[in-house]
Image: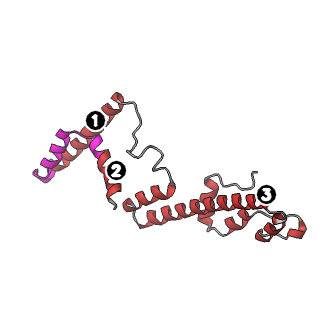
Amino acid sequence: MEQQDGNKVMAFDTLFSTNHIAMLKILLSCLDYQAQKSMAVYIKFLELQYTIHYYNQNPHPLCGCTGPDASRDLPSLCKELLPYCDEKEKKQIEQLCSLFQSMEMYREFSKTMETMKDMIPGFADMSDLFSSGDPSSGSSPDIMSLLINMLTPEQQEIFQMFGGNHNDK
């Protein structure tokens, strides 16, 4: 786990705790097993109670020092989550991140293709070579169909779940 990721967790834990709760956590190790169980539940109760009180007194959203949009990009968010995942969850997050990166690459590629069509006369005819259909038939499916067919069934399902119906123009 990177230091920055740990800092976010520690900052959250610090925000929703008090010095007295921290002292109880320290004393927890001095208690016998039965008392530890009860004390641990009591500590969590105090943290919940403090959190509710905090939000009643501070109706403002939480955001890090880097601003609210800094951690919104998916690859960074995925990277921060990975240390807390088991192997199966890591694989799923990596697949999801890969899918979104592929979609972003497609968007950039589409923009480039449109720009090239506008700038270079006759480029529209050349771009038909990149499609999966027959240019002479006049019905050439877009490259999105080709890319979607390259995804695994699970990735296709995730793509559709996130509004990837490419037939809606």
Residue occupying image coordinates x 62% and y 60%: 103
Mark 3, mark 1: which one is toward the viewer? 3
Foreground residue among 1 and 35: 1
- Within 10 Å of disc 3 (Cα), the crowding (few <14, some 14-19, many 20+) is few
Q: Is residue 60 magenta?
A: no
Extreme residue toward the right, this view: 137
Q: Main secondary structure of the magenta part?
A: helix
Residue 81 coordinates in the image, percent (x, y): 41, 57
Q: Nearer the viewer, mark 1 or mark 2?
A: 2
Circle number at residue 13:
none
Q: Position of residue 116 (x, y in %)?
A: 75, 61
**Left or right of residue 147: residue 124:** right
| Sooner in the amino-acid sequence: mark 3 or mark 1 | 1
Task: Give the residue number, with chain letter if any, for mark 2.
Answer: 8
Check disc 2 and report its element: helix, strand or loop. helix
Question: Which tag is nearer the camera, tag 3 or tag 2?
Answer: 3
Question: Dot 2 surroundings within 10 Å: few (below 14), some, or many (20 or more)?
Answer: few
Q: Magenta segment range?
A: 13-35
Distance from disc 1 to disc 2, alpha carbons, whole Å, reads 19 Å
User: Helix, strand, or loop for circle 3?
Assistant: helix
Q: Is residue 22 magenta?
A: yes
Query: The residue under label 3 is which amino acid type?
Result: Asp
Q: Residue at x 84, y 63 (%)?
A: 121
Query: Residue 21: x, y in percent?
Result: 19, 41
The residue tagged 3 is 118
Q: Are marks 3 and 1 in contact (CB under 8 Å)?
A: no
> Which residue in the structure is indicated by mark 1?
50
